[in-house]
Amino acid sequence: MPTHKHNCLIPLNEQLPADPRRKSKLIDLDEAGRIIATKKIFSIAGSHSADAAMSLIRAAIRAGAKGMTLIPPITTSLAADLPIAAGMLKKLYLSYVGFEVFGMAPAFRKAAETQSLEIIEADEPFILLGTQAAAGGKPFNAVQYIYDGTDHKRLNPELKQVVDPFTGRTVWAIPPLRADVFIMHAQACDEYGNAQCWGGTGQERDKAKAADMVIVQADEIVGSEVIQKDPGHTTVPGLWVDYVVHAPYGAHPTFSSNSYAVDEAHLKTYIDLVRAGKAQEYIDKYVLEPKDHYEYLERIGGLRRLTQLRSSIAVRS
Amino acid sequence: MAEPAYPGTDTYSMAEFMAIVLARQAGGEGETTGGGGANQAVALAANRLAQITVRPDLWLFTGGAGVYNGKFDTLPIGTWDPRCGHGAECKIYIADVVDGGTRGERPGRASGRMKRGGSGGFGGIQVDKFGNINMIGIGEHPKLKVRGPGTVGTIWMGSASANVYVEHHSKRIFVDKCDYISGPGWLSGGDSRHQTLNGRDGPEYIWSPICVLDFTEDEHRARIASVHPGYTVADVVANTGFELAIPKDVPQTTPPTDWELNVLRTQVDRNGVLKKRRMTVGA
């Protein structure tokens, strides 16, 4: 029986009985970055400053991704702002990009105000229902009067009116939001792509179905027996997943639900640098220069900082 | 210059006071849902406080974190903070929220779908005299002078009668007419909202760090309901960019009791987030 080889910190063949006849989807982070960089439209999940696929985003920037369209989750922060700062995005479907208590998203704001980024004035129902339309291969998703009360109807050119053939009413049509690749963060995943998210708002399943390719980054690569213990917690079945990347603390500096806390100090560093016009300094230090993911983790403070973030998920001081 | 909102005493902060005011006014009968925006630590604290004190049937909805009825006693950073999930009862799927919003609230059945009758509400970079809010921006779209963060789910103000909540009271925020509407209040007043949004009622209150506003019965124009300790009707008028309806007698918002402060500090905000939370008055 040949032994299965992995690019992980702890060789998987020491942890679990991998079935060598079954296809392993593990690839390394840089390869994933190169794959993403060949695509035009990518989508991400997570919620605000939590559960963002930051390692994959950094890898895509390192691989030279340019001119991309982002379909974000309903709310996000750094996962949209860093790609904007790095010049990776051409177009953004906007629902919410901001750093909540830490303030406005600096690169997003600047790009919007200098009009260097095409922004579609989308929102929660537009993103979610558009994604669901693409997931089901539907021509569009329709909603009743809700957009009558807001200005989206004149600001979002992708929102259209159609006549409901059953009632004759005029209703709002939301187009399918398909992605070339969906990249997601999971707390645990096996090498076959069965991904378990321990928090969040459940957008991963719709996003996975609405994309032609799915890449999962996971804090932990677990054995099949871990997934089998609780299949009800498997958020996305491996069948839908193309590639898996082992990225411990890969959501940093955002939160990883039930695993480690948001790195508030690091986010403030980012915001301050970008506001001061020094985005490139941040990108050099934390995206381009680290020779691999582990060097990134050293640069953000290493084991000492990561241990603090792990312990602060319970009580905030 | 904007100045920190100060209740005229060091016994409590304005943010603590606001959480208590919102908790008291957590409205509705029977089961209601209390939510709040991403950056609304005050609304988050208020909902938890309301549950513990006067509204045990309030369902605490922390959408960004994806859970109902978290039992935290130290205050998470916002409703998106996964720490809202400690002791929660149900993990939500955001599509359920969207379904509730597009379907519209069903009167008399508040089974946690879209009934946001609890405390908390939507904020904006502009709020106008009819309680409409703007999260889009200021200036000529798409060349906006000020780019807002995006509108998220503020559209749900149109299908649920959510309230408005802001932490800064200035003429820059309280404007006669929003440049854009992302969350519909009473639209252009009178029966315009009922006409446009299938008869749905608009907001009941606007909570600010210096006052509570409600709306006149016919025009649905903002009216001073009460003024917080440390401030006067003249302060509210001076910092509001539209003409307010002002009743003959405007009461002071009732100061917090020792019991309310004690519950807030020992069961909701043990880490004292609200003591430090900055709210401001003036441009």
Image (tube, grey):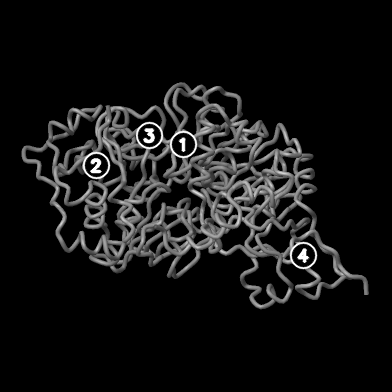
Quarter occupied by the N terminus of chain A: bottom right
Marks 2/3: CA–CA distance: 15 Å
The x and y percentages for residue B167 are: 30, 41
Q: Viewer-nearest of labels 2 and 3?
A: 2
Dot 3 falls on a residue whose secondary structure is loop
Residue kind at label 2, given as amino acid type: Pro
The chain holding disc 1 is A
Q: Residue at x 46, y 62 (%)?
A: B67
Marks 3/4: CA–CA distance: 46 Å
Horizontal side, residue A166 vs residue B264: left or right: right
Based on the displayed image, in which of its 4 quarters is residue B45 positioned? bottom left
The chain holding disc 4 is A
Q: Nearer the viewer, residue A302 or B201?
A: A302
The chain holding disc 3 is B
Above or below, B49 against B22 in this view is below
Residue neighbourhood size for the residue with mark 3, other residues' Cα within 10 Å, grouped as few (<14), some (14–19), many (≥20): many
The x and y percentages for residue B41 are: 36, 51
Horizontal side, residue A313 vs residue B212: left or right: right
Residue kind at label 1, given as amino acid type: Met
Q: Which residue is mark 2?
A: B209
Q: Which residue is mark 4?
A: A191
Q: Are marks 4 and 1 in contact (CB under 8 Å)?
A: no
- Give the label on residue B125, or none: 3
Above or below, A249 against B203 in this view is below
Q: Are marks 2 and 3 in contact (CB under 8 Å)?
A: no
Residue kind at label 4, given as amino acid type: Glu
Marks 4/1: CA–CA distance: 38 Å
Dot 4 falls on a residue whose secondary structure is loop
